[in-house]
Image: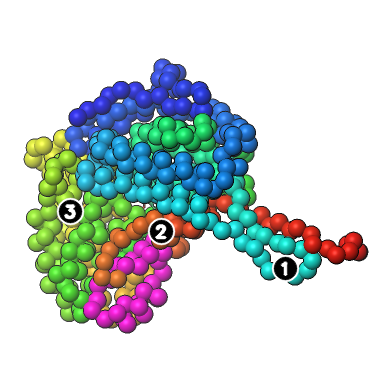
Amino acid sequence: MVAQTVKPFRIGSIVRDDAGAAGVITSINPADGSIAGQVVRATPEDVDTAVNVAWDAFRNKPWRRLRPDQRATVLYEIGRRISAERDRLAHLQMLDSGKPLKECINMVNAAAGHFRYYAAVCETWQDEVTSPRGEYFSMALAEPYGVVACITPWNSPIMNEAQKAAPALAAGNAVLIKPSEETPQLALELVRICTEAGLPEGLLIALPGLGEDVGAALVKHPGVRMVSFTGGTETGRAIGAIAGQRLIPVGLELGGKSPHIVFDDADLDRAVAGVMSGIFGSAGQSCVAGSRLFVQKSVYGKVLDALVERSKGLRVRLPDDPEVQMGPLVSTGHRQKVADCVDLARSEGGQVLVGGYAPQEQPLDQGMFYMPTIIDGLTNASRSAQEEIFGPVLVAMPFEDDADVVAQANDTVFGLAAGMWTGDYARAWRVAREIEAGSVWINTYKQSHIATPFGGFKDSGIGREKGLHGLRLYSQVKSVFFGMHEKSMSL
Ligand code: NAD
């Protein structure tokens, strides 16, 4: 199960395999603390080399000048190859991130789907012909930026990288990816697959370095023309500030504290199942986790009893157990952060109804597991209800009526997602329109696919990924006029 080889990375034709000079990043398997793999660590000097190689590839290789159908052929082939390697990639992903194998398989499938989708977008994209207001023919064209940097978190490796690389490449850019230091292996695999599928060398480079040096160097580098970042809100704010100074565009997909609402007219059984999957899926390490639960007062006790009962029976297991429902957290440090948040909730007066501890029995005691946790007795103003925990911790609160729940749901700096369960679709529509969030789910939760835009309101981000918005994020518009004058132009 353990892969301990040191993986080099490539910058164009340069192979960085000198682990002695740069050192390595060691990825720890969160299930048992063993070494999942080691990669040669990129440095800020590598960023400079990579930017130059990427610009050379952008300017001198035919990629951006290929017809869209020709670019699409390569993107389709990348998707096909990711699918062909699905089981191996999913296994590696599981070792790196600790996510249940079935979730990793879904993520690899999604990554392949992202390349297929943007191949189709590439083939069917239509630039605009604008209505002329004079003697000319005018168009608005989507043009690549040149070299763009994509910085990704650890919670959905390969899927996050594909979500950025596929549209950025489809738009004709050269792409530098900096994966999270917690999960560096899948980005290297993605670059290998892209190259084997026919993507010209230098168009996609992975730099598996630390955020504070390699990530920061990428954002500051004058050769980087656009930054696409997914990660925590404070990191995003710092990146946005630098991008603001440099006047380069950014796409920011940031944190959340999403409200999950249960109205008293809902099918409560389905609502409880939805709330469980909304918070405990991926062990709560999901930007859209439904971590603030609002239940209408008349059914509050009933819903909480059902949630506590189901949480006690949740199968917290090793990620490769076929029956697993919740695996470990990504690292010891992150588990400590989650445990500290639960301690904070206790000190704020919250009652831990279930969970609130790391399991001590074998084999879970070897890994970074934390039990599903539900906290009652806090208000929406508490820090526990306002700050992102990014773990399997649900803060439950009652509400009176529609106006009350809309006010509480919106009383947060975040605005990534929201969900609600109700039997009344007119109410659902009304409330959905009032909620400040980039995605709203009605009688379902955490649905997502590549054709529907995704992104946050407020401190949850800027810009939209996925769908046609995804391609626009990595394109700048150029207007072109062809003169159709009957006579010479006059002043
Ligand atoms: P993080 O912000 O700590 O790190 C994200 C990435 O940024 C990593 O690759 C890291 O190395 C890099 N980085 C760190 N400091 C940097 C700097 N100064 N300059 C440039 N890069 C830097 O986030 P994380 O802990 O990896 O991920 C968890 C967070 O990501 C949560 O807040 C979660 O909500 C958010 N997230 C958001 C989405 C979304 O789509 N909105 C999706 C997944 C995760």
| Front tag of 3 and 2 | 2
Q: Residue at x 41, y 17 (%)?
A: 20
Residue 308 image-quadrant placement: bottom left
> In this rendering, would 302 be left or right of 22?
left
Badge 3 or badge 2: first in the primary sequence: 3
The magenta segment: 414-441
Residue 485 image-quadrant placement: bottom right
Q: Secondary structure at mark 2?
A: loop
User: Badge 2 is on which residue?
Assistant: 451
Compute the Cα span from label 1 to label 3: 61 Å
Residue 68 in the image, given as x and y percentages of width and height = 54, 48
- Observer-nearest residue: 143 or 276? 143
Residue 332 in the image, given as x and y percentages of width and height = 25, 38
User: Badge 1 is on which residue?
Assistant: 132
Q: Check if mark 2's residue and mark 1's residue have beta carbons within 8 Å.
A: no
User: Badge 3 is on which residue?
Assistant: 372
Compute the Cα span from label 2 to label 1: 32 Å
Vertical relation: 418 (above or below) 117: below
Q: Residue at x 35, y 67 (%)?
A: 440
Residue flagged by tag 2: what amino acid is it?
Ala
Residue flagged by tag 1: what amino acid is it?
Pro
